[in-house]
């Protein structure tokens, strides 16, 4: 019995040593880098890159699928229209690490457990992908980004299909739920408000297991438990750059919910206040408020139909930020039958949205609720004007 156990232990040791020996004999060493969140909105979800060390030449290369040309004079136009191209770039590892050190962002490395042939094939694919005629791609935040591209090229160049274990809870979150986590942690409440305004119902479905890897942290979790060729996909994992914890300060004292509650309070005051200035204040307020809602609605309509952003389509926020308000704001003070009917319908829709809040196929930001109540309150007042 003792001899049998000894043989099993020796076989296990030799198998581990053979794996290390195989990787050491290769001219390449490839790893996945997962970078912590930054302060800017585009970086708060972290980042993923692939590191390739070429032992013979000493080259240490980072392949980065999150590169875009910020100096492009049409950058903002292309970004707004959903036509901004991202590309894969190759850069020196030390320069890459210097930038993340300056930004106080952590970097975790996972050594990939690949054969020499798999590593060479992957390196060739990365170099081909980085060529000028191949490097550009149409970035999609959820399905084709700097996290999914490294996953796909690594799995595609593996001899066997890579199997990922479950990395999300049984009660799967929605894409919006997952996006909110980093926004809340970084206290970017106004960014969250804006994102919830323009990213529509298409991000409110449950996330599938591999879809969760659109976020770098979840890709790292997926690789931790991934199996290919009856072996783990990750050989070693370590922190190569530790960030210094810093308490995140809110970007603004006025949070969206506090601000919208303040607007609702003003609306209630001018509606039910018995002051000499209340009526005039209400007239000015209504013109400005419905003009604002109309502008918001027109912007959402533009993002829906005028851009390539698929995630901005089917936006139920248009129910309360109604584009025709932009025109009707100039007729708020007209006491015609048409305006009374229009604002009666507006009040009814606002009430319907509030009542069906949890039933809508799109999760609405809680800071929208005071705006909807305010629209209903002021519209109902306009509907009764004769």
Image (cartoon, rainbow, N blue to C red):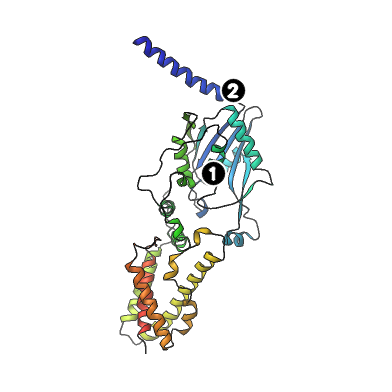
Distance from the alpha carbon under mark 1 to that under mark 2: 31 Å
Disc 2 crowd rating (10 Å Cα; few below 14, some 14-19, many 20+) is few
Residue 302: where, in percent of width, then height?
54, 67
> Which disc number belongs to residue 249?
none
Residue 136: where, in percent of width, then height?
64, 49
Residue 172 appearing in the image: yes
Q: In this rendered view, identify the residue nearer to me: 19 or 249.
A: 19
Disc 1 crowd rating (10 Å Cα; few below 14, some 14-19, many 20+) is some
Q: Is residue 275 above or below residue 261?
A: below
**Mark 1 and 2 residues: CB-CB less than 8 Å, in contact?**
no
Left or right: 266 with respect to 143? left
Residue 63 falls in image quadrant: top right
Residue 385: where, in percent of width, then height?
36, 87
Q: Quadrant of the C terminus?
A: bottom left
Residue 162: where, in percent of width, then height?
49, 35
**In the rendered image, which residue does mark 1 sit on?**
100
Q: Is residue 171 above or below residue 285?
A: above
Q: In this rendered view, identify the residue nearer to me: 202 or 294.
A: 202
Q: Earlier in the sequence, mark 1 or mark 2?
A: 2
Element class at badge 2: helix
Q: Quadrant of the N terminus?
A: top left
Q: Residue at x 49, y 62 (%)?
A: 313
Residue 36 appearing in the image: no
Element class at badge 1: helix
Q: Nearer the viewer, mark 1 or mark 2?
A: 2
Q: Is residue 367 above or below residue 235?
A: below
**In the rendered image, which residue does mark 2 sit on?**
25
Q: Residue at x 69, y 47 (%)?
A: 133
Left or right: 191 with respect to 137? left
Q: Residue at x 36, y 67 (%)?
A: 369
Image mark count: 2
């Amino acid at each position: 019995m003792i001899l049998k156990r000894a043989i099993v232990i020796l076989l296990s040791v030799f198998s581990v040593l053979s794996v290390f020996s195989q990787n050491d004999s290769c001219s390449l060493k490839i790893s996945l880098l997962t970078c912590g969140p930054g302060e800017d909105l585009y970086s708060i979800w972290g980042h993923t890159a692939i590191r390739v060390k070429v032992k013979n030449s000493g080259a240490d290369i980072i392949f980065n699928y999150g590169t875009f040309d910020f100096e492009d004079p049409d950058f903002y136009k292309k970004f707004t229209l959903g036509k901004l191209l991202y590309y894969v770039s190759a850069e020196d590892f030390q320069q890459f690490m210097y930038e993340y050190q300056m930004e106080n962002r952590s970097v975790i490395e996972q050594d990939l457990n690949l054969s020499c042939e798999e590593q060479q094939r992957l390196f060739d694919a990365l170099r081909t992908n980085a060529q000028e005629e191949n490097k550009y791609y149409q970035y999609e935040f959820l399905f084709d980004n700097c996290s999914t591209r490294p996953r796909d090229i690594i799995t595609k160049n593996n001899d066997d299909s890579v199997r990922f274990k479950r990395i999300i809870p049984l009660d799967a979150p929605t894409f919006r739920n997952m996006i909110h986590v980093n926004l809340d942690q970084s206290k970017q409440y106004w960014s969250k408000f804006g994102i919830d305004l323009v990213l529509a119902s298409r991000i409110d479905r449950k996330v599938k297991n591999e879809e969760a890897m659109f976020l770098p942290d979840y890709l790292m979790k997926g690789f931790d438990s991934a199996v290919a060729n009856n072996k783990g996909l990750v050989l070693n994992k370590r922190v190569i750059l530790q960030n210094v914890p810093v308490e995140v300060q809110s970007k603004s004292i006025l949070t969206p919910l506090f601000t919208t509650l303040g607007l609702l309070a003003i609306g209630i005051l001018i509606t039910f206040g018995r002051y000499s200035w209340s009526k005039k204040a209400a007239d000015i307020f209504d013109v400005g408020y419905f003009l604002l809602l109309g502008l918001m609605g027109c912007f959402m309509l533009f993002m829906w139909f005028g851009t390539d952003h698929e995630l901005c389509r089917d936006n139920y926020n248009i129910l309360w930020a109604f584009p025709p308000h932009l025109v009707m704001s100039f007729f708020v003070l007209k006491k015609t039958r048409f305006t009374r009917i229009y604002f009666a319908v507006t009040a009814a829709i606002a009430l319907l949205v509030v009542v069906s809040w949890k039933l809508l196929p799109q999760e609405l930001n809680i800071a929208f609720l005071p705006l909807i109540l305010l629209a209903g309150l002021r519209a109902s007042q306009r509907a009764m004007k004769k």
